[in-house]
Amino acid sequence: MKFFEEVRVGDSYELGRYTFGAEDIKNFARRFDPQLFHVDEDAAAQSHFGALCASGWHTAAAWMRLWVNYQRHRTEASQARGEPVPGYGPALGFRELKWLKPVYVGDTIAYRSEVIESRVSESRPGFGLLTIRSTGVNQNGEMVISFLSTTFVERRPGKP
C-alpha cells in the first residue's frame, strides 16, 4: 500500500481474474439474489439472458475479494521490507455502477482499478481521498462491470 502522496492519477492495478462456475453462480444467487436466471438453468434458458448467468452483485463481490487480496499482498510486502504501512478506508461507496454485459458460466473476468482523481480531505487532514474507476472485462475483451469508488488513504506523517 502506498501513502496518499505516492499515488498518482493514472496509476492502475491489475487485481486478478475470477472464473464463474455454475455452482458458484447458483450458490451466491441462492443466498443473495435468488432470481430464476441465476439459480435455475432451465428457467435461465427461457429468460432474456438465454442461459444461467451470474448476479451483478456476484461480479462486484468477486472484485472486492480480489481488491482485498491485492491490498493484503501489498501490505505484507511493505511490512517484509520494514516499510511503514499507511491506513486506508473507509470507502465512501460506489457510484455509476454499471453491469454492461451478462457474465455466463465459464466466463473469466479480469478486474482492474485505476486512480482517476485525488484530493486532500478537508474533514480529515491526515488523509487524502482517491477516486478509483474499477472495471471487469471478460475473456472476449468485453467490459461487463464498471463503477467508481472513493476511499480515504493516509497521508505521510508530517506532510502539510
Image: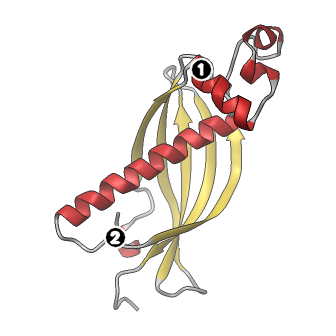
Q: As drawn, is 61 to the left or to the right of 126? A: right
Q: Quadrant of residue 59?
A: top right
The CA span between labels 1 and 2 is 41 Å
Q: Quadrant of residue 56?
A: top right
Residue 62 point in image, percent of width and height: 54, 39
Q: Which residue is at the front of the view, 18 or 5? A: 18
Quadrant of the rendering where the C terminus is positioned: bottom left
Amino acid type indicated by mark 1: Glu
Q: Residues within 10 Å of mark 1 (few under 14, many from 20)?
A: few
Please state the total of marks drawn on the protein image. Answer: 2
Q: As drawn, is 80 to the left or to the right of 98? A: left
Q: As drawn, is 53 to the left or to the right of 6? A: right
User: Do tag 1 and tag 2 residues touch (Cβ < 8 Å)?
Assistant: no
Pointer 2 residue: 6
Pointer 1 residue: 23
Is residue 84 shown above or below 47? Answer: below
| Earlier sequence position, callout 1 versus callout 2 | 2
